[in-house]
Amino acid sequence: MPLKRSFKALTAAAIILLTGCVGYSPNRETIGQNRASLIAYMGLPEREYPTEGMQVLHFPRSPSGSDTYFVYVDNQDRVVKWEQVLTEERFDTIAQGMTKDQVIERIGITKITHGLARGRGYVWHYRYTTPHCKSFVIEFTPEDIVRSAGYRIRSGRFCKYVGMG
């Protein structure tokens, strides 16, 4: 029995160490790395697509995290730049009439979503780092078109959603 328990403990420790190796965010050492090294460090991207002679890899962090990183890889599979895209500057480019794909190409995907009553569409909430406890909210039509977008003020201990800001 002690051998089985030791093996289980060793296995659990190995899993913790291996999952701990995945990085949360890119850093200055990320520039110039090859694609395989990037994925070994960051994990698999949520989405990937070509743009302007490069591949853009999306790395949203945690189910309701406040960071989404876009990493740009050139034709030689080298990282040329990265950016955190959940910013007010980017949010302010989201406008009525845009498609869901256009939104994703600017600020990525969120995991905080809910549907609207009577099949009127759905809403995406983006939490982001701000001292003002705000989030960004997008309402889509059933046809995946932005109906409205804006900021919501969160309050309370965990900054719960309580109204439009």
Image: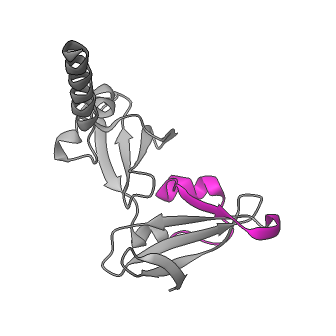
Image x and y of residue 66, in percent:
38, 61
Residue at the image position 65 percent from the left and 69 percent from the top: 139
What residue appears at the point 55 percent right and 71 percent down from the top-left corner? Answer: 137
**Observer-nearest of 11 and 39:** 11
Q: Is residue 31 left or right of residue 100?
A: left
Residue 92 visible in the snapshot: no
Instruction: Give the percent coordinates (x, y) of residue 105.
Output: 52, 53
Q: Quadrant of residue 77?
A: top left
- Name the quadrant of the N terminus: top left
Foreground pick, 117 / 70: 117
Vertical side of 7 occupied by 120: above or below: below
Q: Is residue 84 above or below residue 3?
A: below
Residue 121 coordinates in the image, percent (x, y): 74, 64
Q: Residue at x 49, y 58 (%)?
A: 106
Task: Give the residues drawn in magenta, as a range.
Answer: 93-119
Q: Position of residue 79 (x, y in %)?
A: 30, 37
Residue at the farthest right position = 118
Q: In the displayed structure, does residue 53 sit left or right of residue 5? A: right
